[in-house]
Amino acid sequence: QRTTYSLSTFHRPKHFLLSYLKDWAYVSGTPLSQVSFTVRVMSMATSADQEEGLHLEGLELVNGGWDFLQGVMYPTLASAPPFPLPVILLTAVSIEARQREE
């Protein structure tokens, strides 16, 4: 069972995200300056229950929408209301490992 967080409920969401990175850096033995996030938008068909990381909900796109079938963003008119995103998965990784993957 995963825990999904809504960043809008945090008084300082930046501090929440930073504390997650600090904890991951400590556990992995990686200097904090060498840690970043990978970001993945989860589709409705994707079950992320077993995936480690921060599952975030309640995020919205401004001046854009999300195509759930194709898994891509698309532009909208500036007057369009914010568009709710599906769950976002943030995973902490070392910058070195991330560069190897690219």
Image (cartoon, rainbow, N blue to C red):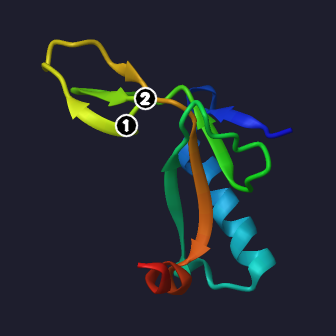
Location of mark 1 (residue): 70
x and y, in percent, of residue 22 in the image: 68, 68
Q: Are marks 2 and 1 in contact (CB under 8 Å)?
A: yes
The number of numbered badges drawn on the structure is 2
Toward which corner of the image does residue 31 lie, by quadrant? bottom right
Please name the residue shown 77% across and 43% down the image: 49
Q: Considering depth in this image, is 55 or 101 the residue closer to the camera?
A: 101
Q: Which mark is residue 13?
A: none
In the image, what residue type sits under mark 1? Gln
x and y, in percent, of residue 36 in the image: 52, 69
Q: Residues within 10 Å of mark 2 (few under 14, many from 20)?
A: some
Q: Say if 60 sits above or below 37 in the image.
A: above
- The answer for how far apart the CA atoms under marks 2 and 1 are is 6 Å
Please name the residue shown 73% across and 53% down the image: 51
Please name the residue shown 33% across and 19% down the image: 82
In the image, what residue type sits under mark 2? Phe
Looking at the rendered structure, the secondary structure element under dot 2 is loop
Q: Residues within 10 Å of mark 1 (few under 14, many from 20)?
A: few
Please name the residue shown 58% across and 30% down the image: 44
In which quadrant of the rendered image does the N terminus lie? top right
x and y, in percent, of residue 89 in the image: 59, 48
Q: Say if 48 sits above or below 35 in the image.
A: above
Q: Considering depth in this image, is 38 or 29 the residue closer to the camera?
A: 38
x and y, in percent, of residue 50 in the image: 79, 50
Looking at the rendered structure, the secondary structure element under dot 1 is loop
Q: Say if 77 sits above or below 18 in the image.
A: above
In which quadrant of the rendered image does the C terminus lie? bottom left
Toward which corner of the image does residue 78 lie, by quadrant? top left
Location of mark 2 (residue): 68
Q: Is residue 49 left or right of residue 86?
A: right
